[in-house]
């Protein structure tokens, strides 16, 4: 592929601005769709607005004009209404009924547009993937400036979506995270949902010229899903989604220009790359972070088990057993011990590993957790003696000081576990 | 009026595709995987375009092989997202669908913009165009469709069991995830085979609408499969005929509209479950399972 030479012109600026504006609107709506698990409805609506647009254009509306916006919203509501009717009246599963409705409406839209191709300036392939590159050449005069018509539409739609979102924020939040409770509390959940669907239709139709019907799905869902991996608060997630959408729109447009291909397609590709990046490298929910957290926990468990083993050996020696009965460290345990000797918790001597004072304190905490749990299980659950060890072996790494204090109070302050061994006292580091 | 031999062979091939898609789709719909094929369908475009770029020719078998590879890759991506991220299923499907279609569109536009010979015709995979098929292509499509039908015949018992009672199937020791993967892969194969006729955007309808319509007429799995196949066959033939009469018209939308018309008739007039029967007769419980 030969790169196109990079020559800046205001036209590219306007195309990027339009793409960014369209993406921002989609990202706001998409955030609510994603947290409400309605992504596929967004998919269905983005297909199904087509006949609405076609009919509105045939009736004399201009692409991007108010009649077309109205037609798209009507088509979206018809889609959702029909899906509901098929579900409740026809007894169909949700995805089956959505699948029937949106493919049929999209097919009808394509046929309408093909049949009326001579009378309207909509072409089936533009419907599928938009013509962002040509957007700057169709301008309207606003307050003395020549602005691209698609940009003006997208800006108005974005403003309307943002306004609606801010005004109904409380309702959206409540409906998104606990629809049943919201309904019980008297919130207008159905109206909220219809508003969201109408906003989806508006965002879709505003994006239509720029990116086409099908890639709208990517712009609705991918920024929101990416942001969801980066944040756990809804308002922050929405802000991040908008930023990601805008950045990807600009990068995607420039990449498409560089490789001389469809801008809408490249924007979707860049969005996909952003999602993969977040899925791998997000600070809390990324794959790397989760694997690292799991590995860190695994190391802590191994290290604490080693300390506890050394402590039990010391206890056995205090009770008169022969020393040095503990030689067979596994490789992983040796690595953990080496690390702990660096941290000053254990010491390598001629007789093998020995606990230092700080290591002993930590070991006593672990053993105390273990034996307290055994005492609690023996007291409350009445498990046989030989069933007490495995659960305690697991939980000893997860008990905090307050839980230990409560368990101690609950088992009546006894100082031995059910095996009759001493429970070490709480350590104050 | 005589119909050219080639047209007849193509019509027969597409009819076989419609039948097999209806049968395979029935199992998918019963297992509540109606839209599993949709992400795969949109992903096929990238594979078709990549296969064209790599091979430099527009041979249907090569293009379809590319489409199948990318369809299976997209399903693999879906599994990875489910396994390794906290993204929920609906969003995962939408992500795979949107991004893989974006890759396809970017490749396709790149090919068109460079004027690579033969690249222009690739657009027919968006909405389907049977007029460009040869008799050999149609024979290939029919052959794969028959193989898919054979696979359904072999695995019908397992698929039915998993569709109606997955918990019981798992408890009885059946490998439910494996059966599910096979089912989804079979749907992906039918989606790819349906591509030349219905196009990437609408081919999902081929595996969704006929089964849903057939379900309204019968409670027996065997009868539903057969009926769904016949509905798919009729819709495919109607689509081919309509786009043959009006050359500008893509085949995919016409197939979908024909299937939707049959669905509408079923919804109104099917015995017991249809609108009319329920207005006149006793009300029966409306469960789809």
Image (spheres, helix red, strand yellow):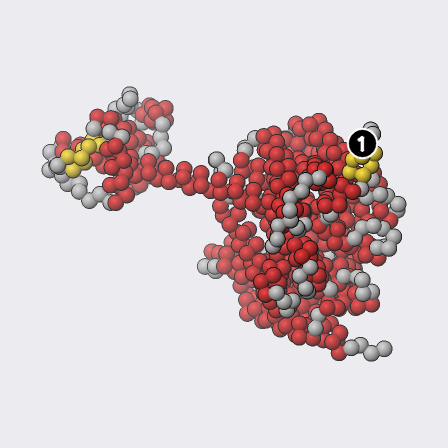
Which residue is identified by label 1? A145
Q: Residue B122: percent from the left, percent from the top? A: 68, 61
Q: Quadrant of the C terminus of chain B?
A: bottom right
- Residue nearest the viewer, comparing B117 with A198: B117
- Residue sitting at 48 percent across and 35 percent down? A283
Residue located 59% across and 50% down the image: B96
Q: So how many labels did they put on this image?
A: 1
Q: Is residue A388 visible?
A: no
Tell which of A369 and A73 is nearer to you: A73
Q: Quadrant of residue B242?
A: bottom right
Left or right: where A168 falls relative to A394 = right
Tell me the chain of label 1. Answer: A
Q: In x, y percent, where is residue A116?
A: 85, 55
Up-down relation of residue A74 to residue A103 (above or below): above
Residue that lies at the very extreme toward the top in this rendered image: A428
Callout 1: 10 Å neighbours few (<14), some, many (20+)? few
Q: Quadrant of the N terminus of chain B?
A: bottom right
- Residue B247 appearing in the image: yes
Question: Residue B162: where, in percent of width, then height?
Answer: 54, 58
Residue drawn at point x = 80 percent, y = 42 percent: A138
Question: In percent of the image, x 27 and y 40: which residue is there?
Answer: A335
Tell me where residue A359 appears, x and y as whole percent.
24, 29
State whether residue A306 is above or below residue A272.
above
Give the image quarter of residue A203: top right
* Whether residue A189 is situated above or below residue B94 in the rendered picture: above
Label 1 sits on a secondary structure element that is strand
């Amino acid at each position: 592929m030969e790169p196109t030479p990079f020559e800046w012109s205001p036209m590219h600026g306007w195309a990027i601005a339009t793409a960014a504006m369209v993406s921002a609107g989609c990202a706001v709506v998409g955030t609510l769709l994603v947290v409400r698990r309605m992504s596929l409805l967004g998919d269905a609506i983005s297909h199904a607005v087509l006949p609405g647009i076609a009919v509105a254009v045939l009736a004399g509306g201009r692409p991007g004009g108010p009649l077309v916006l109205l037609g798209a919203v009507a088509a979206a509501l018809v889609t959702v209404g029909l899906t509901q009717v098929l579900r409740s009246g026809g007894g169909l599963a949700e995805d089956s009924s959505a699948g029937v409705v949106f493919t049929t409406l999209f097919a009808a839209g394509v046929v309408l547009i093909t049949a009326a191709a001579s009378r309207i300036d909509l072409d089936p392939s533009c419907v599928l993937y938009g013509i962002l590159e040509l957007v700057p050449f169709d301008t309207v005069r606003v307050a003395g400036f020549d602005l691209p018509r698609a940009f003006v539409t997208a800006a108005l739609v974005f403003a309307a979506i943002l306004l609606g979102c801010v005004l109904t924020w409380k309702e959206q939040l409540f409906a998104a995270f606990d629809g049943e409770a919201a309904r019980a509390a008297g919130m207008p959940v159905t109206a909220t949902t219809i508003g969201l669907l109408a906003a989806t239709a508006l965002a879709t139709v505003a994006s239509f010229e720029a990116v086409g019907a099908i890639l709208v799905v990517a712009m609705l869902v991918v920024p929101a899903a990416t942001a969801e991996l980066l944040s756990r608060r809804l308002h922050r997630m929405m802000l991040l989604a908008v930023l990601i959408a805008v950045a990807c729109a600009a990068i995607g447009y420039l990449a498409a220009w560089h490789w001389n291909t469809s801008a809408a397609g490249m924007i979707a590709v860049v969005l996909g790359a952003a999602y993969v990046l977040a899925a791998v490298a997000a600070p809390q929910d990324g794959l790397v972070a989760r694997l690292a957290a799991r590995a860190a926990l695994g190391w802590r468990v191994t290290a604490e088990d080693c300390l506890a083993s050394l402590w039990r050996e010391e206890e056995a020696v205090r009770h008169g057993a022969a020393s040095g009965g503990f030689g067979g460290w596994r490789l992983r345990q040796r690595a953990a011990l080496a690390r702990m000797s660096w941290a000053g918790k254990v010491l390598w001597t001629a007789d093998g590993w020995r606990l230092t004072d700080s290591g002993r304190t930590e070991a006593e905490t672990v053993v105390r957790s273990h034996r307290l749990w055994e005492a609690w299980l023996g007291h409350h659950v009445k498990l046989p003696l030989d069933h007490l060890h495995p659960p305690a072996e697991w939980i000893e790494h997860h008990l905090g000081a307050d839980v230990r204090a409560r368990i101690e109070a609950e088992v009546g302050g006894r100082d031995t576990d059910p095996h009759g061994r001493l429970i070490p006292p709480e350590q104050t580091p | 009026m005589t119909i050219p031999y080639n047209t007849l062979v193509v019509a027969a091939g597409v009819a076989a595709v419609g039948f097999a898609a209806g049968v395979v789709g029935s199992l998918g719909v019963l297992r509540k995987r109606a839209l599993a094929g949709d992400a795969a369908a949109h992903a096929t475009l990238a594979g078709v375009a990549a296969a064209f770029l790599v091979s430099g020719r527009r041979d249907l078998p090569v293009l379809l092989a590319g489409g199948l590879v990318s369809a299976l890759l997209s399903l693999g991506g879906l599994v990875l997202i489910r396994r390794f991220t906290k993204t929920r299923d609906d969003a995962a499907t939408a992500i795979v669908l949107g991004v893989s279609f974006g890759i396809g569109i970017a490749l396709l536009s790149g090919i068109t913009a460079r004027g690579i010979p033969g690249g222009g015709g690739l657009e027919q995979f968006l909405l389907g165009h049977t007029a460009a098929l040869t008799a050999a292509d149609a024979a290939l499509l029919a052959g794969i469709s028959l193989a898919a039908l054979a696979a359904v015949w072999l695995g019908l018992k397992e698929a039915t069991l998993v569709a109606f009672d997955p918990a019981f199937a798992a408890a009885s020791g059946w490998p439910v995830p494996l059966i599910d993967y096979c089912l989804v892969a079979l749907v992906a194969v039918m989606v790819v085979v349906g591509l030349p006729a219905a196009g990437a955007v609408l081919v999902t309808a081929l595996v969704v609408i006929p089964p849903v319509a057939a379900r309204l007429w019968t409670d027996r799995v065997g009868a539903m499969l057969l009926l769904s196949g016949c509905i798919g066959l009729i819709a495919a033939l109607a689509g081919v005929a309509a786009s043959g009469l009006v050359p500008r018209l893509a085949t995919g939308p016409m197939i979908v509209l024909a299937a939707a018309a049959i669905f509408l008739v079923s919804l109104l007039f099917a015995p017991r479950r249809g609108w009319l029967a329920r207005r006149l007769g006793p009300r029966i419980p409306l469960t789809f399972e």
